[in-house]
Amino acid sequence: MAIVHQVVEVVGRWSRRPRRRVDRSAQLFLRLTKARKNDLRSDPAPRGGYVAATGNRRIVFTVAVWKNSRTMNPITIELKLTSQEELQLAGILGKDVANLSQALAPHAQAALQEYLRMYLGQKVFTRGADMREYRLFLLVSTAFANRIPDEATVSALFQCTQSQSRALLRAVMSKYQYDLNKAIDDTLRDAVRGVRRDPGGKYILIAKSENIVDALNRLLASVDVSQDQVVRRSGKLGTYELTPSAYDALCTRFGIKAQKS
C-alpha cells in the first residue's frame, strides 16, 4: 500500500534568547529525536508538499522547525503501524486509511510543540491534569483548525468518558481563555450561523457540545443579564431553543444577519 508524508511547520518562533543558547536547544532537540543530518538533507520533500512512499506500511512526517527567521534542517519522523492499528486510528480520527498520514500531520505538530516547550523550560508540568489541558489546547490550534471540539471527539482521542471530556474542555476554555479567544469566538459564531427557524417560528440550535451552549449563555448574560437562556428542547438530543431576542442579540454580537423567515 502507498502512504504519503507531509511537510509540517511548527507555528511560532524560537524564544528571543542569546544565539548560543538557541543553537544548543536546537542541537538537543535534534539529538533527542535521533535525527541524522545526512538523512534530513537528503529528504526530497518540498516545503509544504507531499511525496508518495511505497513498501512496508509506514507513516513518515518531515517537520521544519522555525529558528528565529530561518528554518532548521527538517526532522523526519517515521511511525510503523499494523494494518489493524491503522484501521482503528482512521476510525478514531474519522478519516480514510489512505489519508491517515495527512490527518496525523497536525497532531504531530502539536506533539512537537509540547516537547519543545518542555525542553525550553516554558511548559513543565507536575500534574497529569495540567499536561492533558495543555495538550488539548495545542490540538485546538492544529488538529481542530482553531475550533473548539465537541465532547465526543475529545473522548475518542483522550480515552475518557463524556463527563470527563466535558470537564476537560471547560478547564481548557477557562485556563487558556485569552489564548483561545479567537477559537472560542469563531466556534460560537459558527454555532449561531447554524441556527434555523422551525415551522412554529422558534429558533433552533443544533449543538454537540454542552460547553458551547454554556458559553453562549455566558455571552448572553454579559450582553443583557435579563436575557432568556438557550435551553434544551424537551425529548431532543443536542437540540436547543432560542428566543427571538436572544437570537438577535447573538447575531448582533457576531455580526451575523438574522434570519427572519
Image (tube, helix red, strand yellow):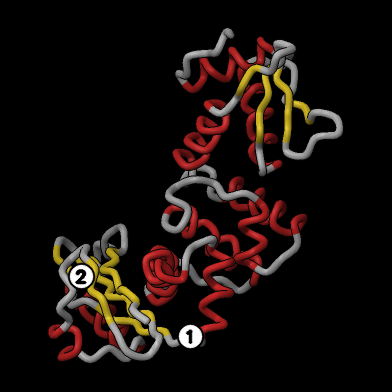
In the displayed structure, 193 sits above or below 104; it is above
Which one is in front, 152 or 201? 201
Q: Position of residue 49 (x, y in %)?
A: 21, 65
Screen quadrant of the N terminus: bottom left
Dividing the picture into quadrants, the one containing residue 217 is top right
Residue 200 screen position, x and y as percent = 74, 12
- The residue lying at 64 percent from left, 52 percent from top is 169
Q: Are marks 1 and 2 in contact (CB under 8 Å)?
A: no
State the SS at label 2.
loop
Residue behind mark 1: 81
- Secondary structure of the residue carrying numbered label 1: loop
* First of labels 1, 2 by sequence position: 2
Eyeballing the image, is 179 above or below 215?
below
Task: Specify the quadrant that holds the C terminus.
Answer: top right
Q: Is residue 176 left or right of residue 204?
A: left
**Type of residue at label 2?**
Pro
How many angstroms separate mark 1 from mark 2 (CA)?
A: 41 Å
Q: Label 1: how many residues lie within 10 Å, few (<14), some (14-19) or many (20+)? A: some
Tell me, yes or no, if residue 162 can be seen here. Answer: yes
| Residue 117 visible in image | no
Q: Quadrant of residue 247?
A: top right
At 56% from the left and 28% from the top, the residue drawn is 194
Disc 2 target residue? 18
| Residue furthest top as drawn | 260
| For residue 86, above or below residue 154 | below
x%, y% of residue 69? 15, 61
Task: Work out whether residue 47 or residue 235 is closer to the camera in this orientation and state it.
Answer: 235
Q: Nearer the viewer, mark 1 or mark 2?
A: 1
